[in-house]
């Protein structure tokens, strides 16, 4: 029995699907299946069975799951304590982030971080809020950057910044010509380009509901950069965090502010607690917090 097998089992139990769990772990599905089979052989019992809707735990699997989680948690704490003895951070640190953060903020931050800590390997991934929270809680990620509030009470959050949501519209759009901030109620008849699960999407849906209008969704995306490109091509408008529109002057879209009191988001760095962080994870956490604090005062 090894940690990779335990991680495979815990991940499959959480996701309920081999394909999803394999993707999250960065392994092939056949490789994941072999790890699970080896674990079952070692234990001498079936832990999982395939069902039409995915994979379900057997009674033995349900009984073994909390023990597997505790074993991985104990290993993480032990690793973190040993890492604290190392004066020079090194090794891998895993950081998850919302797409808007991963695409438009992390590249420059990670470049600067690597310049200071060349022996640390950042392992970055993007995802939706609930997924990232779950991966931190399970120990799969050391840190994540998500919007507040948190869904879970067992995680620690440190606020990084707060920003408004703004409208990205095709160049020369009628909303641009108004030359003033607009109410979201003025946008409900527009074709919309959205990423399901984003805070801007929720705000637009709420505005449409308030006006008794069904949202005119022109395109659904799963890519932040793809969403901006759809706006540039005139397919619709999008409500985005200001972070995603900083370079709009050099791109083919305009930015229209929303009236005072409009939607905003608070962004935080999240982890399970200092005792779970390796030296590398603590170095990255401190670096991100300090870098963003300096940028606010420049």
Image (cartoon, rainbow, N blue to C red):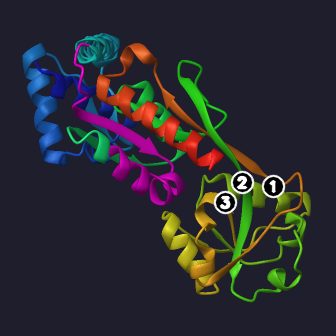
Is residue 61 inside the magenta stretch?
Answer: no
Q: Which residue is mark 3?
A: 242
Front position in the image: 158 or 33: 158
Question: Which residue is rendered at x = 17% and y = 28% of the image?
Answer: 4
Question: Which residue is rendered at x = 13% and y = 46% of the image?
Answer: 30
Q: Which residue is mark 2?
A: 202
Q: Which residue is mark 1?
A: 206
Question: Which residue is rendered at x = 39% and y = 13% of the image?
Answer: 275
Instruction: Give the Cα separation between the discs numbered 3 and 1.
Output: 20 Å
**Residue 204: image location, x then y, percent:** 76, 61
Q: Determine the image quadrant of residue 108.
A: bottom left
Q: Decide: is 225 above or below 139.
A: below
**Residue 52: image location, x then y, percent:** 35, 44
Front position in the image: 268 or 127: 268
CB contact under 8 Å: marks 1 and 2: yes
CB contact under 8 Å: marks 3 and 2: no
Q: Determine the image quadrant of residue 266.
A: top right
Q: Which residues are magenta?
A: 85-113
Q: Residue furthest bottom?
A: 172
Instruction: Give the Cα separation between the discs numbered 1 and 2.
Output: 6 Å
């Amino acid at each position: 029995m090894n940690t990779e097998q335990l991680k495979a089992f815990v991940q499959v139990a959480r996701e309920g699907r081999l394909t999803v769990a394999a993707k999250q772990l960065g392994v092939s599905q056949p490789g994941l299946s072999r790890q699970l089979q080896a674990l079952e052989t070692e234990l001498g019992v079936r832990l999982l069975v395939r069902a039409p809707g995915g994979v379900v735990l057997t009674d033995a699997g349900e009984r073994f799951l909390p023990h597997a989680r505790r074993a991985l948690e104990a290993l993480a704490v032990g690793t973190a304590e040993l890492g604290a003895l190392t004066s020079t951070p090194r090794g891998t640190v895993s950081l998850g982030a919302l797409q808007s953060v991963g695409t438009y903020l992390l590249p420059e931050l990670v470049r600067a971080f690597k310049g200071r800590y060349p022996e640390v390997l950042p392992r970055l991934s993007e995802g939706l809020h609930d997924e990232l929270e779950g991966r931190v809680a399970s120990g799969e990620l050391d840190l994540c950057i998500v919007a507040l509030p948190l869904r879970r009470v067992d995680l620690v959050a440190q606020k990084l910044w707060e920003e408004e949501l703004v409208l990205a519209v095709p160049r020369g759009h009628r909303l641009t010509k108004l030359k003033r901030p607009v109410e979201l109620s003025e946008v409900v008849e527009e074709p919309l380009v959205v990423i399901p699960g984003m805070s801007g999407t929720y705000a637009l849906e709420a505005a449409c509901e308030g006006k008794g209008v069904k949202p005119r969704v022109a395109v659904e995306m799963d890519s932040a950069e793809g969403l901006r490109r759809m706006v540039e091509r005139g397919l619709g408008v999008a409500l985005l965090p200001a972070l995603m529109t900083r370079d709009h002057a050099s791109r083919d879209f305009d930015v229209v502010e929303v009236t005072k009191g409009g939607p905003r988001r608070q962004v935080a760095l999240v982890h399970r607690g200092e005792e779970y962080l390796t030296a590398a994870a603590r170095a990255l956490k401190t670096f991100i917090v300090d870098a963003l604090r300096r940028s606010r005062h420049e």
